[in-house]
Image (cartoon, coloured by chain):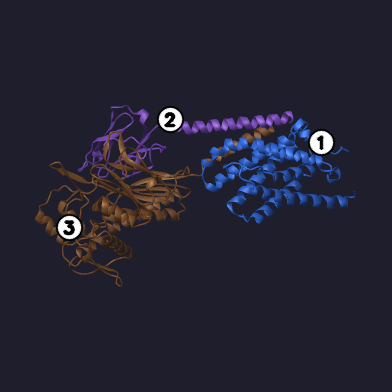
Chain colours: A blue, B brown, C purple
Amino acid sequence: MNGQQEQTRKLLNLSLLAAGGTVLHALESYLPALSTLPGAKLGLANIASMLALIWYSAGDACKVVVLRVLLGSLLAGIFFTPSFFLSVAGAAGSFGAMAAAIYMSGGALSIIGISILGAVAHNLAQLLMAMLLARSWGVVFYLPWLLLFALPTGYFVGLLSTLVVRLVPFSFRLPLITTGKNRQDLTCKCRICRWSPHLPKED
Amino acid sequence: MRIKPVILVFVVTSLCLAGCDQVSVKERRTEFLLDTAVTIAAYGPQAKEAVAAALAEMNRVADLLDANNPDSEVSLINRNAGRKPVPVSAEVFELVELCQHYSQMSSGAFDITVRPLVELWGIGNKDEYVPGPEEIDRALELVDYRQIILDQQKKTVYLPRAGMGIDLGGVGKGYAADRAREMLLEHGISSALIDAGGNIWALGERPDGKPWRIGIRHPRPKADRNVVAVLSGRDFTIVTSGDYERFFQRNNIRYHHIFNPATGLPARGLISATVVGPNSAEADILSTAVFVLGADQGLALVRQLPQITAMVVTPDLDVLLAGPLQSYFEFTGKEGVGR
Amino acid sequence: MTAGDVKVVLAVLLTAALASGSIFFWKNRVPQLNPVELTIEVDGQEKQRFFFSDLEAGGQHRIKGVLGYSLLEVGDNKIRMVESPCPDKICIGMGWISQPGESIVCIPNRVVVRIVGSNDNGYDALSR
């Protein structure tokens, strides 16, 4: 692949991720609520942010996140409503935490751990925004629940991301950033994560 | 490096906990006006300014309506009884009209022309005494809301007979509380408690997001029990009229300050009447009207008004309710509800 | 999951436990440690504020009002007015108060004794 092709492919892939994230976000809003807690969502759209972070750079992933949030809110008709600000806070929080984790953890964390951190930050940022919007610190009582809730949802999103990273053919991907390690190091080695119906042969 | 994620979580958590305290500002002030103690507690970023503005407004209303202040419009009306119509501000005119409306609805149970009676009995003053029947009859001749002459065009109020007098004390606290609420709302306050001498406006909800809880004073309190019931709710006003606030006793008979304009004597049908609604001036009027009318007629009046809820306590300490908010009363004792 | 992931999970669990612990404490400790707080206002100004637990039951407390001295009597987590220079003595007639939201008001002497701090058993204001 020459540079021109690579650029085009990257643009295409980032757009696909943004679109995919938007769709996942919309899909999730159709799922029955997991709990009555505000912000207690699966956060499927975080898969898009996660993949963009893994396959490309933090700057590229940032573009995907911004696009996804803007498109998603416009589609849902919540642009500049309180839900929009909650959504922005959540996306920014999880993106920031995941980017920081990928660049700073030095390979100690797998996608699962990164995803859990992202989910935690997502919920914390939403909680903070909710407190600002409601001008009340009353919601702080949700904090422990939101933290605990981030564990299964973060795990689930991490698991899905791991599967995608492994299942998507290599030709789709580009060399990975992170701290000198390649993308395989980010995928988890445990039995659950290694399971996959048709694991393509690695290059 | 591995410790970083943990730090991140802690930093975000502590930032969040530290930032929260700033959000809710509280201001509480008490002032003595309208013959009572008025307390406003407000929560929100502009609470200080809002409470100051609300109290200033209540002071203005108090000056406007005080029948004992020779400069008030109400005194002017009373001084010119039997002499000439008095032009008044639109505010006082509308208030008198509102009172007249409920006087008609309650067949005169609420009547702003009771001033001659109040002066005769002197309740709340040093020279309180029990007048004889002739004296009462003479005072009663001057008590009749139907005689007030209102001129819509010129906005004048005229009391046609010398000696007549109006007293807006039965609506003043409520109206002042309504005005205070307006001022708080203008300052963006969405959580506040206005207590105008037991006339309560519970604005919005409690700062912790829970409904306000307003106790209703037990008319015959015991050592361990001061309230009959507690009403929980958001954004409502509650007014209670009772025979216990201002009274004196002679020969074991309690003479209190709420008169029945039909008999000229303190009303006897109830010992406490509480009215809950969306407007404090109306609730204030209605609590007096219901108190004077008694349980049956009083609650019948309340049932005609869809937004009004009432709770009354009879001399036998029976508790009766009417209106849409009945189920929000939480009773602290075993008083019977219903009959 | 890697060892790092496990650490993240443990950190989150620990934070959640700490947060819920402190919230639990904060929620439960406030009403228990300062069960009822009392304020005394004279002419609209808060003059004194103390906890019931700091007051000795059976003791008396003097307040200088506008007309003169009002005398409060402290009971077992309750308080009442026993002497007042006001003409009508309504404040004395109010009897004991003990619940958050309750107050003794002496209008002539400009004295307000108020029990503050609302909890679920009490109420925020009293309609009278």
Q: Between tags 1 and 3, which lies in front?
A: 1
The quarter of the rendered structure image containing the N terminus of chain B is top right
Q: Can you say whether B310 is above or below A118 in the image?
A: below
Chain under callout 1: A
Residue C17 lies, in percent from the top left, at: 58, 30
Alpha carbon separation for disc pair 1 and 2: 55 Å
Marks 3 and 2, how far apart in space? Answer: 53 Å
Q: Residue at x 77, y 30 (%)?
A: A191
Q: Answer yes or no: are tags 3 and 2 on the same subunit.
A: no
Name the secondary structure under disc 3.
helix
Residue at horizontal 76 percent and vertical 45 percent from the top: A52
In the image, A90 versus C74, the foreground residue is A90
Q: Residues within 10 Å of mark 2 (few under 14, many from 20)?
A: few
- Residue annotated with mark 3: B116
Q: Quadrant of residue B314?
A: top left
Estimate the x, y position of residue C96 in percent, counting from the top left: 28, 35
Q: Mark 1 and mark 3, same subunit?
A: no
What residue type is disc 2 on?
A: Gln
> Residue pushed farthest front?
B339
At 44% from the left and 54% from the top, the residue drawn is B185
Report helix, strand or loop for mark 1. helix
Tell me whether marks 1 and 2 sit on the same chain.
no
Viewed as shown, does residue B120 lie left or right of A139? Answer: left
**Left or right for B15, reference C110:** right
Callout 2 secondary element: helix
Image quadrant of residue A39?
A: top right
Identity, as a three-letter code, of the amino acid under mark 1: Gln
Instruction: Specify the quadrant that holds the C terminus of chain B.
Output: top left
Crowding at label 1, few (<14), some or many (≥20) Cα neighbours within 10 Å? Answer: some
Please tell me which residue lies in front, B109 or B59. B109
Q: Chain of mark 3?
A: B
Q: Chain of mark 2?
A: C
